[in-house]
């Protein structure tokens, strides 16, 4: 697996729907275009929600995986 | 690119607290997804935006309905109230009886918003 190097980081651990999406929105708005944002979330809803958020907003979900019960996402800001 | 639009219609009132959070939560989430949300209160639904009513509603771990509604208004999400419902269900309520930020509109607006929206959800 290709290792992705992030420019920014967001920890959504302990947050549940819809809070992670609100945090993601705030964070994305605060970073520069083309930046790669790494997000960690333990909300089981995050897997589908983050995929759909990226699809709807046009930001690119580069990769995601589950690690120690938490999801790790890499989203590139468009 | 023009934003997609979702219209949420609330027909349930404060006597049915389990149905009241969803439109506010979904509308705020829509905003965070670059979607343009609007919430329309129809029939019994108008009681949700009547002053003083949402304060008394609290479900599970969520904040009170009032707090969720205030956050929705702060985000600039339009809350529209059906004028006829105010007369029929509300015993002649006026605009002053509703929370600040709620706008009184009519049936033509709802029909038009439905046609204009990319999707609607009814609660």
Image (cartoon, rainbow, N blue to C red):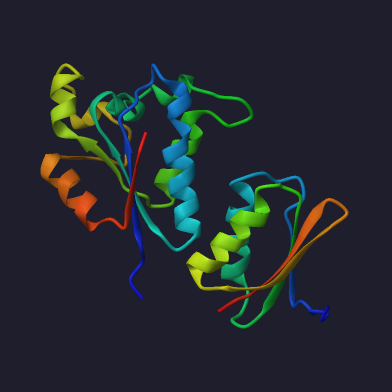
Residue name at image x 28 percent, y 30 percent: B98
Q: Quadrant of the C terminus of chain B?
A: top left
Specify the farthest residue to the right.
A68
Image side of residue A32 versus residue B43, left or right: right
Foreground residue among B12 and B52:
B12
Q: Position of residue A47 (x, y in %)?
A: 67, 56
Residue B7, above or below B69: below
Image side of residue B123 versus residue B107, left or right: right
Residue name at image x 60 percent, y 55 percent: A49
Q: From this viewpoint, is residue B71 visible?
A: no
Q: From this viewpoint, is residue B75 visible?
A: yes
Q: Position of residue B70 (x, y in %)?
A: 44, 39
Q: Quadrant of the N terminus of chain B?
A: bottom left
Foreground residue among B85 and B97:
B85
Specify the farthest residue to the front.
A1
Q: Position of residue B42 (x, y in %)?
A: 25, 32
């Amino acid at each position: 697996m290709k290792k992705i190097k992030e420019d920014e980081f967001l920890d959504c651990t302990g947050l549940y729907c819809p809070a992670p999406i609100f945090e993601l929105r705030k964070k994305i708005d605060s970073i520069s275009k083309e930046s790669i944002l790494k997000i960690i979330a333990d909300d089981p809803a995050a897997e589908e929600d983050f995929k759909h958020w990226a699809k709807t907003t046009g930001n690119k979900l580069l990769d995601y995986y589950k690690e120690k019960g938490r999801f790790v996402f890499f989203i590139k800001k468009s | 690119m023009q934003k997609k639009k979702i219209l949420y219609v609330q027909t349930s009132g404060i006597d049915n607290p389990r149905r009241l959070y969803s439109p506010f939560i979904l509308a705020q989430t829509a905003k965070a997804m670059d979607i343009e949300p609007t919430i329309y209160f129809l029939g019994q639904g108008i009681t949700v935006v009547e002053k003083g009513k949402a304060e008394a509603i609290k479900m599970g771990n969520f904040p009170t309905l009032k707090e969720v509604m205030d956050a929705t208004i702060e985000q600039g999400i339009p809350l529209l109230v059906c004028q006829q419902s105010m007369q029929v269900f509300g015993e002649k309520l006026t605009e002053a009886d509703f929370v600040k930020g709620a706008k009184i509109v009519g049936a033509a607006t709802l029909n038009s918003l439905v046609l204009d929206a990319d999707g609607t959800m009814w609660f």
